[in-house]
Image: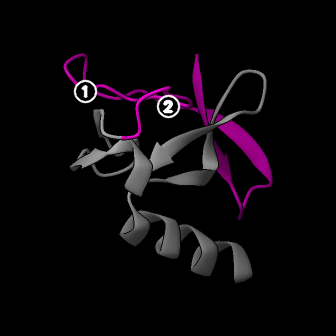
């Protein structure tokens, strides 16, 4: 299950990605190619950041690209 935190509404909302995206919260292989859980860009897992708003039901953040992470941080600061 994926959920996306809304900083404005201060609550989680359901979130889905396309079925062909490979999104992860953890990998043993830092060279593994995954999709950014926000924009879908393919990136090696080791270059990803942990999302501030796209989480599992248990609260673990999905991997996102650095550009999307920066956008999340700016959104959170508003």
Circle 2 is placed at which residue position? 15
Q: Relative to residue 71, is residue 54 drawn left or right?
A: right
Packing grade of label 1 (10 A; few <14, some 14-19, many >=20) is some
Q: Is residue 78 above or below residue 28?
A: below
The quarter of the image holding the C terminus is: bottom right
Query: Is residue 19 located in the magenta-colored stretch of the structure?
Result: yes
Circle 1 is placed at which residue position? 21
Residue at 39% x, 29% y: name it: 23
Residue depth check, mark 2 versus mark 1: number of the one nearer the observer: 1
* Prevalent SS, magenta region: loop
Q: Is residue 32 above or below residue 48?
A: above
Q: Earlier in the sequence, mark 2 or mark 1?
A: 2
Residue 16 place in picture, x, y as percent: 41, 27
Residue at 42% x, 67% y: name it: 66
Residue 3 place in picture, x, y as percent: 61, 31
Magenta residues? 1-30
Query: Is residue 18 located in the magenta-colored stretch of the structure?
Result: yes
Packing grade of label 2 (10 A; few <14, some 14-19, many >=20) is some
């Amino acid at each position: 299950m994926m959920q996306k935190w809304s900083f404005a509404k201060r609550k989680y909302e359901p979130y889905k990605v396309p079925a062909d995206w490979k999104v992860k919260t953890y990998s043993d292989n830092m060279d593994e190619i995954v999709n950014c859980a926000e924009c879908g860009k393919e990136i090696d897992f080791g270059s990803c950041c942990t999302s501030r708003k796209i989480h599992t039901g248990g609260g673990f953040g999905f991997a996102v690209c650095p550009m999307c992470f920066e956008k999340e941080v700016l959104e959170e600061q508003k």
